[in-house]
């Protein structure tokens, strides 16, 4: 059985993830192509408090984002359900 403290911690981390997802979707909406390289997004990680495992965050939410490889770059794009 979960204690109230563990439930609060779980709720905080869930809320934090939701806010990170919204920030990432908003950042991609500002671009004309609705996509950006993973390296470029890493430059915004401190300002938007993205986790250091940005690729894992994107891979956990395929309903919002997709990854595609273009040469030696990895692109992050906004999926259709994030409009």
Image: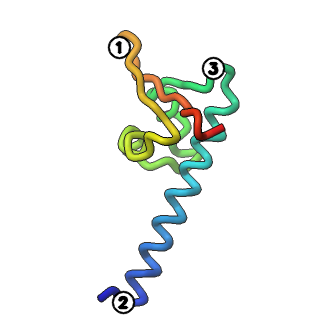
In the image, is residue 65 above or below residue 8?
Answer: above
Residue 27, position as x, y percentages in the image:
63, 36
The percent coordinates of residue 76 (x first, y second) are 48, 29
CA neighbours of label 1 inside 10 A, class few (<14), some (14 to 19), many (20+) = few
Name, please, the residue furthest toward the left: 1
**What secondary structure is found at the residue carrying circle 3?**
loop
**Looking at the image, is 27 positioned above or below residue 34?**
below
Residue at 36% x, 43% y: name it: 56
The picture places residue 44, in percent across and down from the top left corner, at 55, 37
Which residue position is annotated with label 3? 33
Q: Which residue, as the protein is rendered here, is positioned at the far top? A: 71
**Residue neighbourhood size for the residue with mark 2, other residues' Cα within 10 Å, grouped as few (<14), some (14–19), many (≥20):** few
Q: Earlier in the sequence, mark 1 or mark 2?
A: 2
In the drawing, what numbered circle is on residue 3? 2
At 54% from the left and 65% from the top, the residue drawn is 15
Identify which residue is drawn at 61% across, 49% down: 22
Question: In which quadrant is the N terminus drawn?
Answer: bottom left
On residue 72, the disc is 1
Considering depth in this image, is 64 or 24 the residue closer to the camera? 64
């Amino acid at each position: 059985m979960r204690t109230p403290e563990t439930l609060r911690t779980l709720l905080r981390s869930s809320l934090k993830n939701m806010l990170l997802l919204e920030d990432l979707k908003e950042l991609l909406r500002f671009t004309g192509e609705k996509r950006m390289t993973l390296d470029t997004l890493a430059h915004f990680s401190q300002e938007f408090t993205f986790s250091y495992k940005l690729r894992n965050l994107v891979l956990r939410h395929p309903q919002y984002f997709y990854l595609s490889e273009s040469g030696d770059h990895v692109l992050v794009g906004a999926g259709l359900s994030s409009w």
